[in-house]
Amino acid sequence: MLVVCISLSYCFYSTQVICQEAILHISNGATDKEYCLVYNSLWTNLSLSLSAATAYPLVNLSSSLLCSSAGVSPDIVRGKAVVVMRGQCNFSQKAVVAQDLGAAALIVTSTTSMSPPGANVTEYEKVQIPLALMRYTDFLDAQNVFGEEMQVRLYAPAVPVFDASIVVMLLIGVVTVALGGYWSGACESHACCPLFRGEEKSDSGDLALYSPLKVVIFVGLMCLMLVLMYFFYKYLVYVIIAIFCLASATALFSCLDALLELAKCSPMSVTVLGRSVSVRSVLLSAVCVTVAVVWGVYRNEDRWIWILQDLLGVAFCLNFLKTISLSNFKICVILLSLLLLYDVFFVFITPLFMPNGESIMVQVALGPDAAGEKVTTRLSLPVVMRVPRFSAWAQNLCGMQFSILGYGDIIVPGLLVAYCSRFDMWVNSPKKIYLFCCCIAYLCGMVLTFAVMLVTKMGQPALLYLVPFTLLGSALLAWRRGEMRQFWNGTTYEVLDSNREPLLPGVLSPPDL
């Protein structure tokens, strides 16, 4: 539940970049290669495309800090791009010296963090040449590839407002919610679907929230865990990672085992020391543990590890929605409303009274400089789905940019979707009308979230849109079908047979809509 408490605190945020990443294109006539640049868009105007960028010969002065013109001949640098080392003096001083020597552009190599070069506003007007920051390791690589004869071009391609990663993220969210809801409903009766044949009813209700007090305690624990993470991040981050590896491996096993049951794959049981052991389960366990361990070891390898994180995340959410059940719509309303208030409070209210105007949730998401975890993105904790931004070419050279979706934005409305799916079973709804309509409401809420994000160019807390859409959509459907009383109160009956009469007293076969 520790991972759940943290994961429910994460809302959708798509990485938005003020265009301060650029591309250094290097060629020698036979070979070309591109590297990351960081620049200040208020200071330097760069071309938007490679074809429009001016080519400059590159002069290597990386042995110099260029804090003064002493020892540098203007004839060496005139009309060329100059590479110098970072240190001792500020960027504007280096740029003015290079400009006075006749240089056409200045590239400062850095062995420390890559942050946009800045200066006082009054100093911006003094510099008329392009100025950018480059990793020193990238410059060494360029020297190995090209030697000393290099032609360079600096450009900063525009980042499109809309990126295809948004569509992929939308599909991940909707499909996971729909499958998790369907699985929860199907588990109400092990005979209703071959995928779940052989599962006991208890599998779908390992933990049931059936009283308002339980819901309040649950949300209170989430608040406590978030505050603890804010103050003790460097200690708890590794606890969260370890628990996530264990929980996601278990969830992945549960999902894959169900698929193998659907495929009628033999368990291949053998007898060991008088006990029956399933070879299939042993092999499947080894695979799932291996996937989780690989993710844990290589979690900061952005180029490919996001695939494993999304796989484990989908399995975690599916298993959660199958395992946790809400007993009635009243509990759904209380839980989702409290979580919406929780979300708004920790994102928008805490900056009003925290030091430096910090949002507790955002700070926990980013992570402090301690703990050795990656802190340049919101991906320090394994509680988000993430998909690379396909069109952010310059930004991905500097470090992968992601659209992200918190597990909480799948699990929280997913619990309501799962309740709707179980209610379909209770009232013998052949068309799964409640499940279908709640999934449509979730889709509409996600689309609105993305639309607001694109218009405002700011990350959005998705629960702000998902909770009203799913709650109102489900309630309107129950009212329209005349089943609001039963939908509100739920049922305590056991589901015994998929061909039974409706279990809720007074509920007739549902009308066609």
Image: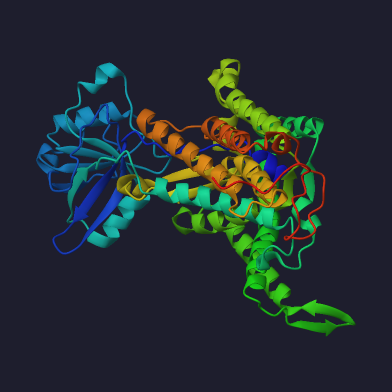
Residue 241's place in the image compared with 266, above or below, is above
In percent of width and height, residue 295 lies at 58, 58
Q: Please tell me which residue is depicted at 35% across the width and 51% down the height of the picture.
A: 390
* Relative horizontal placement of residue 449, taking residue 49 as reference (left or right): right
- 416 or 245: which is nearer to us? 416
- Which residue corresponds to the image point at 59% horizontal and 48% vertical from the top-left? 435
Instruction: State the residue in front, 166 or 110.
Output: 166
Q: Position of residue 471 (x, y in %)?
A: 60, 34
Do we see residue 79 in this rendering? yes
Which quadrant of the figure contains the N terminus? top right
Q: Which quadrant is the C terminus positioned in?
A: top right
Residue 498 falls in which quadrant of the image?
A: bottom right
- The way the protein has been coloured in the rendering is rainbow
Q: Depth check: 214 or 151 in front?
A: 214
Question: Is 159 rendered above or below residue 299?
Answer: above
**Image position, residue 266 (x, y; %):** 70, 80
Horizontal side of residue 240 vs 314, given as left or right: right
**Which residue occupies 60% across, 21% down?**
350
- Left or right: where 434 falls relative to 504: left
Give the number of marks: 0
Can residue 245 be seen here? The reply is no
Residue 250, position as x, y percentages in the image: 70, 60
Along the viewing direction, whichever of 276 and 178 lies nearer the viewer: 178
Residue 190: quadrant of the picture: bottom right
